[in-house]
Amino acid sequence: MTQRLNIFITLTTVTLTCTLARLLQAQAEKTPENFQGAGSGSAPDFQKYVFFAYGLTCLLLFLFTLRTISQCRNLQKRVDYLEERFKEANPGGESKAGGADL
Amino acid sequence: MPEHFLFAQFSKKTEIRKGTRILVIEFIISIGLGAVKVALAMALIWLIAISPHQLNNLLGWILVLVTLAFVGFWVPPEEKILGSSYLIFFFHFPSAINCMNLFVIGGVFSFLCLLNKNSSLKLSATSCDLWAASAIEVGMLACTITLVTGGIWGRAAWGEWDTWIINDPRLMSVYFMWLTYAAYLALRASMDKGRRRELYCAVFGLLATLNVPIVYYAIRVFGKENHPMSLTLDQTSMKTTQWVGAGAFLVLYIGLMRLRRNYYKSCEQTDRLQEDFNRARI
């Protein structure tokens, strides 16, 4: 379940980032006459700021997810190690260590 | 009785009937809208509290994508005063409001952890501690996103990075809150697991929650410098995107919080298992 979740989270984050990039590109491609405030002509172009703000939000969410995935992998290794220890101690017995279902 | 008097009485009765009918229709509509709102709130609570946390995370990401789609295709690309920089608001506001929500949740669990010292509640002290740590960790993520997006927006709107922190009570208090919770995480990381760490962290977590009302009322108490109390959005698309975004990020952050809590719980179980193995010399 953990692995499937990790794959899902990674894929979603990638999709999120790609969609974001596409949306911002679409926003940037709009001609000035499509803009509501084009008549006033006073507001400067803030597209790069919007891009950085959304990009950094995605990056932070991605890094947080990556950290959780890496910690889950380490935990999985510990559980595997305990399982091996248990199997070595009881060669005929069933494993009780199990996996951590995150 | 004169004829015109009868006619006046008749038209008056008709008006009353019409008025009553309109009132009844308005009442039914208001009840219907209320029911829809209650249903939406219940659905949100179900998503957050009862659904499996994987589904919670999935729906959180989907709702964030929906918010992005609203930002890209529905709301106007520019606002009359802030220009296109106002688009940052749709990620900045949800993170800001939800970081405060998460810190309050962390404070509540810290309080429950302290309360559990002498009484036996359904939630054990360790469980409360794990919930508090998870909420504060995800709250820190939300607070960092708020500071980063706020800083960029500040650069775009005010033209200076440093105005962002030094001269403004709201920004200064958020920065202070971030540092307080960073200290909480440092304290937690520096102590060994056990009841002592739970108590220290619970006291710190509870005291740190005092930051939340200070942040919220900073502008009312200390006066406004740059940051407004709230941004008034005049169009339906903007308002809808603002609140859909807030809901989306709430669902996502609660999902992440549950994920972190499950991770910590699994760590605790593995530690206990390892101790048992060591004791049994397996």
Image (tube, coloured by chain):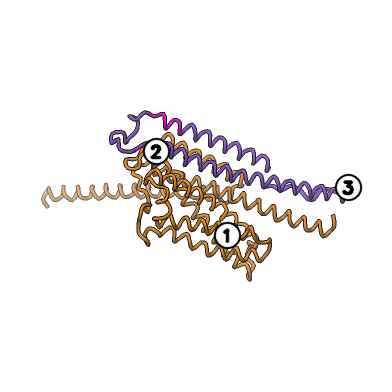
Quarter of the image where one finds residue B61: top right
Answer whether labels 1 and 3 touch (C-beta < 8 Å): no
Q: Residue at x 57, y 42 (%)?
A: A62
Disc 2 chain ID: A
Answer whether labels 2 and 1 touch (C-beta < 8 Å): no
Identify the magenta region: A24-30
In the rendered image, residue B143, in percent from the top left (x then y), is placed at: 50, 51
| Colour applied to chain B | orange
Q: Which residue is mark 1?
A: B184
Q: Nearer the viewer, residue B128 or B143?
A: B143
Mark 2–mark 1 distance (CA, rounded to whole Å): 36 Å
Which disc is residue A91 wearing? 3
Give yes or no for residue B115 being in the magenta stretch: no
> Which residue occupies the extreme left position in the image?
B2
Q: Residue at x 84, y 58 (%)?
A: B280
Is the magenta region chiefly helix, strand or loop?
helix
Disc 3 chain ID: A
In the rendered image, residue B69, in percent from the top left (x then y), is placed at: 46, 36
Of marks 1 and 3, the one in the foreground: 1
Q: Same chain for labels 2 and 3? Say yes or no.
A: yes
Q: Which amino acid, mark 2?
A: Phe
Q: Which amino acid, mark 1?
A: Tyr
Q: Residue at x 59, y 68 (%)?
A: B115
Q: Which chain is purple?
A: A
The answer to whether any part of residue B46 appears in the image is no
Q: Nearer the viewer, residue B143 or B237?
A: B143
Label 1 element class: helix
Screen quadrant of the N terminus of chain A: top right
Q: Badge 3, how many Cα within 10 Å: few under 14, some, many 20+?
A: few
Q: Which amino acid, mark 3?
A: Pro
Mark 2–mark 3 distance (CA, rounded to whole Å): 66 Å
Which disc is residue A17 wearing? none
